[in-house]
Image (tube, grey):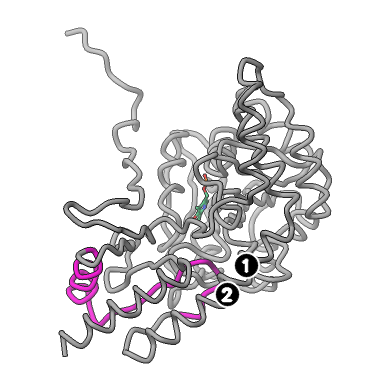
Amino acid sequence: MNKITPQPGIMDIALYQGGQSHVEGVENVIKLSSNENPFGPSPKAIEAVRDSATLLHRYPVTDHYNLRAAIGERHGLDPDRIICGVGSDEVLQFVAQAYAGPGDEVIHTEHGFSMYPIIARMAGATPVEVPERDRKVDVDAILAAVTDRTRIVFVTNPGNPTSTMISDAELTRLAEGLPQTCLMVLDGAYAEFVPGFDGGAGLVDRFDNVIMTRTFSKIYGLGGMRVGWGYAHREIIDVLNRVRQPFNLSLTAIAAAEAAVADVEYVEFCRAENARLREWLSAELAKIGVPSDPSCTNFILARFADQAEAEACDAYLQSKGLIVRRVAGYKLPNALRITVGDEKACSRVVAAITAFKGGAA
Ligand SMILES: *Cc1c(COP(=O)(O)O)cnc(C)c1O
């Protein structure tokens, strides 16, 4: 019988579950489920997008030179060692496609980003999950899981949905412990929220097999534009460019990202506001018996007594127009991930969880 069938393994790929954005029958909803910037993009990025509209008949550049130069200048990095992608997700996909295939293993951690196993399977490779310790990446567990088939290790630092970080010393120990045949990918999607943190760029400079990825989707507030980038050794960038489509980034996306990365003041404002509101939110929730680990990101992982309480609280928040993220799929059934919104959003969250806890008592 002739039947069109996909390649082996394709149907094993899970469909990514995005953050929910509306609640049936509830108005005035605040979305706190996708770690978006509550203040939106830089006004300069918005202006650049408007200006780009008259040029939409033109193909975008293929080498992203100006954007890479702007990123390089902002972070003190060599633009020739930067690659840009349609979100950092695309850069992660380039890495898997170029360096892993059938029979190869790709390590990700227990509470790691759900895109890692998806991306591994897209390349035909086998994802291998490694436990974390108290919601933190466990370097020893990763090293113990490495086999001669391991090609890539994905580590998010700070982590999503855990919000925790491991130290530079721990990351160095991981890089030193991995075989040279294995790439270490440091996903720095939340690096900008940590003052003074280089996202792992220093490790890239010290180890040939380390790659850092970054995104414009979080602190830059450009999730809708889809721009991310990677930093690695020149040889690796050269490999990744061979699996990148020449026009992967749209002209509009390039314009927005270029303007955003140059607006240092706006990023600083977002970082400071996030830190202030995050500390307030976590402290208020802790007072009413909802603890969370100290967060290094723009969200907190609020812990409840058990899965039933977390789900009941989520349902209550939804009824109040507050959408947060359930993380049972990340092996954190007792927790809810709550993006730090603006002041009004944080106040609404605290009021709603206080009412929920009061009602439950
Ligand atoms: C949000 C996020 C990203 C960013 O993905 P983009 O494709 O750049 O939007 C990457 N990794 C993690 C862990 C994230 O939470």
Q: Nearer the viewer, residue 213 or 357?
A: 357
Amino acid residing under circle 1: Arg
Q: Quadrant of the N terminus?
A: top left
Q: How many neighbours does mark 1 have within 10 angstroms: few (below 14), some (14-19), or many (20 or more)? A: many
**Residue 353: image location, x then y, percent:** 28, 79
Quadrant position of residue 238:
top right
- How many labels, in total? 2
Residue 59, given in percent of the width and then of the height, sits at 65, 18
Real-space Cα separation, disc 1 to disc 2, in angstroms: 6 Å
Residue 271 shows which numbered tag?
1
* Residue under the image location 23 percent in, 54 percent down: 23
Q: What residue would you read off at disc 2? A: 275
Report helix, strand or loop for mark 1.
helix
Q: Is residue 344 depicted above or below 243 in this figure?
A: below
Q: Considering the numbered disc 2 on the image, is that residue within a helix, a strand or a loop?
A: helix
Residue drawn at the location 56% of the way across and 46% of the way down? 222
Task: Look at 55% across and 58% down and name the residue there.
Answer: 155
- Report if the beta carbon of the residue with label 1 is closer than 8 angstroms to ligand 1: no
Q: In the rendered structure, which segment of residues is drawn in magenta?
A: 293-318
Dot 2 alpha-carbon crowd within 10 angstroms: few under 14, some 14 to 19, many 20 or more: many
| Amino acid identity at mark 2 | Ala
Residue at image position (61%, 57%) is 188
Q: Quadrant of residue 86 in the image?
A: top right
Q: Quadrant of the C terminus?
A: bottom left
- Percent across and percent down for residue 223 are 51, 46
* 323 horizontally vs 121: left or right: left
Q: Is residue 55 left or right of residue 67?
A: left
Marks 2 and 1: in contact by CB < 8 Å?
yes
Nearest to the observer: residue 75 or residue 8: 75
Of residues 355 and 198, the one nearer the viewer is: 355
